[in-house]
């Protein structure tokens, strides 16, 4: 006998919809549903067709052997319809395509349990070009893997919600593919698909049948732990105004300069930054409201010249918008006002705000590792650093005591390559450097002597290493 089960997704319950009537000679069986006699409550249903040789139906279709499940098809084009699951195939269009990367779904009620969803289709895909579903010849291998059946969504604080099912599982895999492409820009779609399959096969514990199978595919979507974020290390240098010379080191240690050249005049204020986005910080000077920036650390004329600010302003530099290029700004001590430009050119400030007190010492850096530089101050009155994670007016996000402004000049940089800029000081009278790997109170993580007393400290990545 044939038993047609219906599963109401609203009530999560199986029911026998109809059994076959033996009004035709074997091996033919006919199933007919009269919806006037057996009405369906409004809802969403899945169907399962079972061959039962024992008479009375089992209340749970999952209790039947896989060989007793019969594939449901629409005879016009051999497309499977409304199938709950089927050991041979329940994949439907467009997942039946040979080039599709089909994804099944599992649910995870707790940290240690993953269960394949009953609505997650089994392969292989059976299409007119992929194998006759009644011939015993398999079609293309599908699904490729399974992923979590749920999502949670938050957009702009105005919407929270989510969606479930294989559409959610497919979205997870699509997101994983985007991350792999971001990490490996040269990957083709075949490279990405193979990378996802290998990660699943190696890390998901081989659910289902041994090896890749047509229920779980290659296994669970698992990207593994992310690679630790690393950045190049910033190192120190000095500007010696007695001879207009820069002395830059490629390590935070005592020793001779790795780069030495003449650029500027004694009255200039100095800055450093990556002005062209090549990963190497180079020097610049601010003279009477005009910036003169170099794209290499060598003697010569400025590559970029423009006016911005006033002669009494203090120049600053940073990547204010996360585009990988450092641009300039000024701190106006008489107003405690900051004016930032997103390009190294004349014009109105792109960002302007007040922060701190008048006549403080400005600093800049990426304090939280988000690839955007923000501002801060080193306050002489209480020896505290007041760092902001946004370029806006407000209270400090980070504050702590380190150094003594009466004795020390502030310096900032990524001293350990963790992609977070932290503070340091150059003790003028001793020409000693004291660098911290966290923006907290404490002893120096790195200390050494370099340069002469009362020189101007600078920092940057001079060699992109």
Image (cartoon, grey):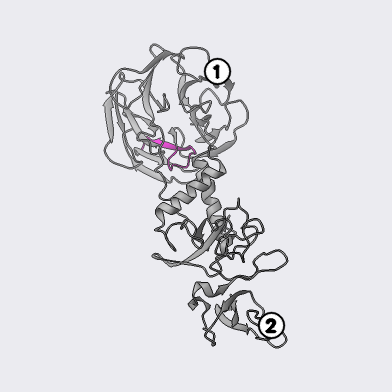
Secondary structure beneath label 2: loop
Q: Which residues are magenta?
A: 366-381
Q: Residue 33 got which mark?
A: 2
Q: Residue 230 appears in which quarter of the rendering? A: top left
- Give the total of numbered labels: 2
Residue 225: percent from left, percent from top? 40, 49
Instruction: Locate the N terminus by quadrant.
Output: bottom right
Of discs 2 and 1, which sits in the foreground?
2
Q: Residue 303 got which mark?
A: 1
Secondary structure beneath label 1: loop
Instruction: Decide: is 395 above or below 271.
Output: below
Q: Give the alpha-carbon distance from disc 2 to disc 1, as whole Å.
A: 82 Å
Residue 318: percent from left, percent from top? 49, 32
Q: Residue 465 appears in which quarter of the rendering? A: top left
- Label the magenta part by its dominant secondary structure: loop
* Among numbered discs 2 and 1, the one appearing first in the sequence: 2
For disc 2, the neighbor class at 10 Å (few under 14, some 14 to 19, many from 20) is few
In the displayed structure image, the side of residue 253 where residue 38 appears, left or right: right
């Amino acid at each position: 006998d044939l038993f047609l089960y219906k599963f109401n997704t609203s009530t999560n319950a199986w029911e026998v919809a109809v059994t076959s009537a033996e009004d035709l000679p074997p091996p033919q069986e006919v199933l007919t549903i009269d919806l006037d006699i057996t009405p369906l409550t409004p809802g969403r249903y899945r169907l399962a067709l079972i061959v039962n040789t024992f008479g009375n139906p089992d209340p749970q279709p999952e209790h039947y052997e896989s060989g007793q499940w019969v594939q449901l098809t629409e005879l016009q084009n051999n497309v499977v319809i409304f199938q709950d699951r089927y050991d041979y195939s329940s994949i439907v269009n467009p997942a039946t395509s040979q080039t599709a990367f089909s994804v099944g779904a599992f649910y995870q009620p707790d940290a240690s349990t993953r269960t394949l969803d009953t609505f997650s289709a089994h392969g292989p895909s059976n299409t007119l070009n992929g194998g006759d579903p009644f011939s015993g010849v398999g079609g293309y291998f599908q699904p490729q893997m399974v992923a979590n059946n749920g999502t949670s969504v938050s957009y702009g604080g105005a919407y929270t919600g989510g969606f479930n099912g294989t559409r959610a599982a497919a979205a997870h895999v699509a997101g994983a593919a985007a991350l792999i492409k971001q990490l490996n820009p040269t990957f083709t779609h075949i490279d990405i698909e193979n990378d996802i399959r290998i990660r699943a096969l190696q890390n998901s514990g081989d659910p289902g049948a041994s090896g890749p199978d047509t229920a779980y595919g290659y296994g669970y979507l698992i990207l593994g732990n992310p690679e630790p974020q690393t950045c190049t290390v910033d190192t120190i240098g000095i500007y010696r105004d007695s001879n207009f010379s820069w002395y830059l080191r490629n390590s935070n240690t005592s020793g001779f300069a790795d780069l030495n050249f003449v650029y500027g005049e004694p009255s200039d204020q100095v800055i450093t930054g990556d002005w062209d986005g090549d990963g190497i910080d180079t020097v610049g000077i601010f003279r009477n409201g005009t910036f003169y920036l170099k794209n290499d650390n060598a003697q010569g004329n400025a590559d970029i010249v423009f006016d911005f600010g006033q002669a009494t302003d203090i120049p600053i530099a940073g990547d204010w918008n996360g585009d990988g290029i450092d641009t300039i700004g000024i701190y106006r001590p008489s107003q405690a006002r900051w004016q930032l430009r997103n390009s190294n050119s004349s014009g109105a400030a792109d960002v302007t705000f007040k922060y701190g007190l008048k006549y403080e010492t400005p600093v800049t850096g990426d304090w939280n590792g988000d690839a955007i530089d923000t501002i801060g101050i080193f306050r002489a009155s209480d020896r505290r650093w007041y760092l902001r994670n946004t370029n806006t007016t407000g209270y400090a996000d980070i504050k702590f005591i380190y150094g003594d402004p009466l004795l020390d000049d502030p310096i900032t940089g990524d001293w350990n390559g963790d992609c977070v800029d932290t503070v340091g000081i150059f003790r003028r009278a001793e020409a000693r450097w004291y660098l911290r790997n966290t923006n907290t109170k404490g002893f120096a993580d790195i200390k050494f002597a370099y340069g002469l007393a009362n020189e101007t400290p600078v920092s940057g990545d001079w060699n992109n290493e």
